[in-house]
Image: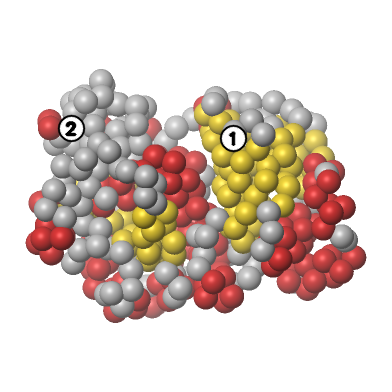
Amino acid sequence: MTFKPFRHLLTGMAFACLLTPLSTLAASTDNLWHDVAGRSLAANAPKPAQFRSLSLDSRQMAAYLAQAHARGIATAVSLPLPEGGFSNFNVVDSGTLPPELQAKYPEILSFKGTDAEGRRLRLDVSPLGFQAMVFDKDGIWMVRPEVIAGGNDNYLSYRRGDLAGLGGQWQCDTHGDQVNPLTEAIHPKAVTPSTVTGAQQRVYRAAVAANHQYIAAVGGGTVAGGLAAVTTAVNRVTEVYEYEMSIRLVLVPNNNLIIYPNAGSDPFSSNGTGVINNSTSVINAAIGVGNYDIGHVFTTGSGGVAGLGVVCGGSKARGTTGLPNPIGDDFYIDFVAHEMGHQFAGNHPFNGSKGNCSGGNRNGSTAYEPGSGSSIMAYAGI
């Protein structure tokens, strides 16, 4: 697999920063985008019912954002709306990568921002490409490479609602009986959380591991590629958690130590129960038991398995999410945010008992939502 558009990225950034004043690009980054009519989608591209097909000068965009990031300033970025036209977002560093980890991987940049209409943006630039997720009043829309790490500048802009869901691919297994006694001692009411979160933002140090199958699936098969994909996922999940619960996730400074691109050194399978049975011991050994607050493992086959209310306790890494295609809004929002929500003591709120809601997944004391539910902790539409 080739990373042609981002090859020698730092060298290209350096020359571009010398040649192109920041103010010039800031005035109109929409000039880096060009509509492409009639292009057929690649076989492994997402297939939304409606989409906008574009090309992006990705090297110039990466150089522009790297320059702004290095100067620590807010900057303007134009994103193509799915229906046509552009929206200008003011973006700043998202804080997903701590300074120590950012210094090790300067090619991975992570941003957050807003536009004049109040839309909220999460944006990442890495060897995997330019990827954006926008939350607006009509739902979520995406801007992403047609194929992640696909080796070209073909991009798509589309709304989440125009993309078919994953349906029966998902299985969630909440281990409520596995709550660690230490967690109970620290948070005795963790499994019956308050409906009021308060105004204080809480920052949690997240140790997010990735097995070799996940890293191969997201592109590249390298530590940098795996970490880039993890950064994108955590940045997206944090948007939901900050907005809904005033919780921010920050990757631990040595998170690269738990990205396993090689099968021979990978301690994790893609079996959900198998993963969480050793996830805490593996992450404790690599990161240090006192150096993180929540741990999670990404795979391609573990479905979703998590301990209930385990954050900050002795079983704080008992959580995993895995799908055959672990990329995109479905994976980040519907599944990773859902499983991490269990770790933060969120239970299933749906009242349905058929289909995916059967098999003991319904929790009577929190079954407030009709049918399969509508919130992230429910099984909305699956």
Q: Residues within 10 Å of mark 1 (few under 14, many from 20)?
A: some
Above/below status of 179 relative to 19: above
Amino acid on which disc 2 is placed? Thr
Q: Tag 1 or tag 2, which sits nearer the N-term? A: 1
Q: Residue furthest right?
A: 19
Residue that mark 2 sits on: 366
Considering depth in this image, is 109 or 380 the residue closer to the camera? 109
Contact check, label 2 and label 1, Cβ < 8 Å: no
Amino acid on which disc 1 is placed? Arg
Residue 367, x across and y down, in percent = 19, 28
Residue 273, x across and y down, in percent = 22, 57
Residue at (38% x, 78% y) in the render: 265
Q: How many marks?
A: 2
Cα separation, mark 2 vs mark 1, equals 31 Å
- Is residue 213 shown left or right of residue 184? right
Residue 38, x across and y down, in percent = 78, 31
Residue 119 disc label: 1
